[in-house]
Amino acid sequence: RLSRSAARAALVLYDIRAKESELEQASRLFYVERTSATRGNEVRLLHGAETYDAIEAAIAEASPYVHVEFYIFHPDRTGRRILDLLEQRARAGVTVRLLVDAVGASDLRQKHVAGLVAAGGTFAQFLPVNLFTRPFSVNFRNHRKIVIVDGHTAFTGGMNVEDGHDEAVSG
């Protein structure tokens, strides 16, 4: 249960966020983190299917590299679309690296990434669980969600690769 002052602060923060534009929200994040945006950059907040569309478009144009890192990466329709694009770029000579969390993407098997690896891409799992040699590794996970394309375009946020985050697929 929140104290009265904490509840009031939460309502005030909600009210401020409701009135801010997306750019103002992004600017606030830069200030909070004590970083600054450099000139000529663009920050856009994306949601749901538009996020996947933008990521897929960036991957399709990638040259010379694309680095992808996700906590959850399911081999469902959304995951297969991204895997197919990564494989296509690897076949085109683009350096492709895919890193997933061994627990969060436990259903992404070697058979799902075989095409990517055969095309020259790299696939790795972060910290596979081994109860004998690393019994506490199950609690040390990589929750990052990052896509970097050619050092010019980057995506980060809270979405993983799964149909549940794509309303175009999940309905």
Image: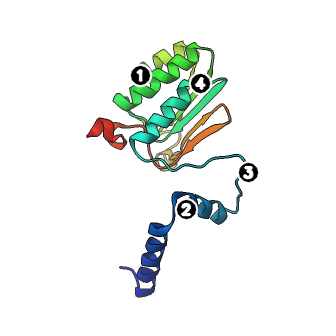
Cα gap from disc 3 to disc 4, whole angstroms: 27 Å
Q: Which image quarter: residue 24?
A: bottom right
Q: Which residue extends farthest right?
A: 39
Foreground residue among 29 and 38: 38
Tell me the residue at 40%/87% (across/down): 4
Under circle 3, the secondary element is loop
The local crowd at label 2, few if under 14, some if 14 to 19, many if 20 or more residues have their Cα within 10 Å, is: some
Q: Nearer the viewer, mark 4 or mark 1?
A: 4
The local crowd at label 3, few if under 14, some if 14 to 19, many if 20 or more residues have their Cα within 10 Å, is: few
Q: Earlier in the sequence, mark 2 or mark 1?
A: 2
The image's mark for residue 25 is: 2
- The residue singled out by tag 1 in the image is 112
Cα gap from disc 2 to disc 1, whole angstroms: 38 Å
- The residue singled out by tag 4 in the image is 96
Q: Answer with left or right where residue 94 lies relative to residue 163.
A: right
Q: Earlier in the sequence, mark 4 or mark 1?
A: 4
